[in-house]
Amino acid sequence: MKPKTMPDATAEPQFRQAAAAIRSADTILIVSHIFPDGDAVGTLLGLGASLRELGKNVSGAIDGGVPPDLAFLPQSASIASQITQGEFDLLIAVDSSDIERIGIAGAYGLDHCKTVINLDHHATNTHYGDIQVIVPGAVSATEVAFDLLSFMDIDLEYDAAYALLTGLVTDTQGFRIHATNARTLEIAQALMKLGAPLPEIMARTLNRRPYQDIELWKLVLPSVTLDAGLISANITQKDYARSGVDAMSDGGLVNHLVNVDQAKVSVVFKETRANQIEVGFRSEPGYDVASLAYQLGGGGHKQASGCTVAGSLLEVRDRVLPLARQVVENGPAALD
């Protein structure tokens, strides 16, 4: 299961503390962030399946449950949409850069778990919890989970490998983001050797979408504007109601818009609730939208991030777009 190279030795104390906490725990709750993506769900499922094989009593919860487009993952039905009872020895919060992002399920876990592990790869992580397993050099939280399980000498089964490879594929956009490296592919190969079906995962997560997404795009595309490298769009509550798309999603629009030739940064404003706007950012390599999201109380990757901002759609646009324009005007930074 182990790739030929291991993460930087500086991460070893974090892995050692987490491994000890996991081995001493009998009951474990794993949560991830609101509006979960493939990395969030894949990390939760991969860890959960592996720790159950270790004999642990594992529960998983994400506010609202698993999005329909990720319900194909093995054991996805084991993730509850809410949690209201139970006491746990250990909480593992995965792929969540701050406490607010773990939502109501995470808040319950913080109050009803003896120890908290914060497992993440975002440089914007606020270092909450008792044990921080935060590896900013990792391309996904699933990579961190893979390395932790490898460090603990836990053999992965098919379901765990499937989930972890899904997170790796989705967070690297099919191995296309700048942070993708030789080790990323080495881990993918190790998971494929365990049976994880890469072509199927890529087809399900990157190449296909429900027709409702197209209905949403039909309504939203008239709102798209492009100005000197900054492209943006608005999704209203009415658009969600008319298209039938869950308000968690933009149907992949923010990823699609950043691929426009003239675009450097894309921004999609989602009116998910009254007076609350979810904002998604994407950028070309060299343009850092993680720091932009962090300014607004969110976080993420340099090329993919997001935040939640209070206010009307117009108010939030007026606040956010000048900051996004500044990212474009600052120009690309040197790539690592």
Image: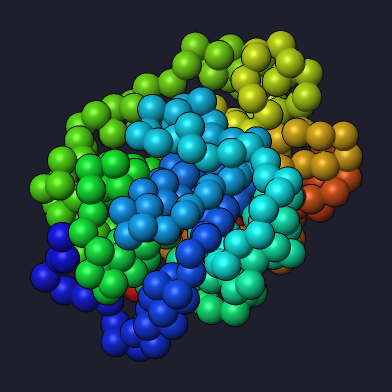
Residue 334 appearing in the image: no
Location of the N terminus by quadrant is bottom left
Give me the residue at 35% from left, 34% from top: 74
Give me the residue at 24% from left, 29% from top: 200
Location of the C terminus by quadrant is bottom left
Image: 130 above or below 229: below
Quadrant of the image occupied by residue 73 = top left
Along the viewing direction, whichever of 275 and 116 lies nearer the viewer: 116
Along the viewing direction, whichever of 310 and 328 lies nearer the viewer: 310
Residue 159 appearing in the image: yes
Left or right of 36 on screen, residue 187: left
Along the viewing direction, whichever of 313 and 242 lies nearer the viewer: 242
Left or right of 270 on screen, residue 131: left
Give me the residue at 60% from left, 73% from top: 115
Residue 140: where, in percent of width, then height? 39, 58
Left or right of 178 on screen, residue 222: right
How did the renderer colour the structure?
rainbow
Residue 99: where, in percent of width, then height? 69, 63
Quadrant of the image occupied by residue 196 = top left
Give me the residue at 64% from left, 25% from top: 246
Residue 223: where, in percent of width, then height? 69, 25
Residue 19: where, in percent of width, then height? 38, 75
Image: 221 above or below 159: above
User: How many marks can you see?
Assistant: 0
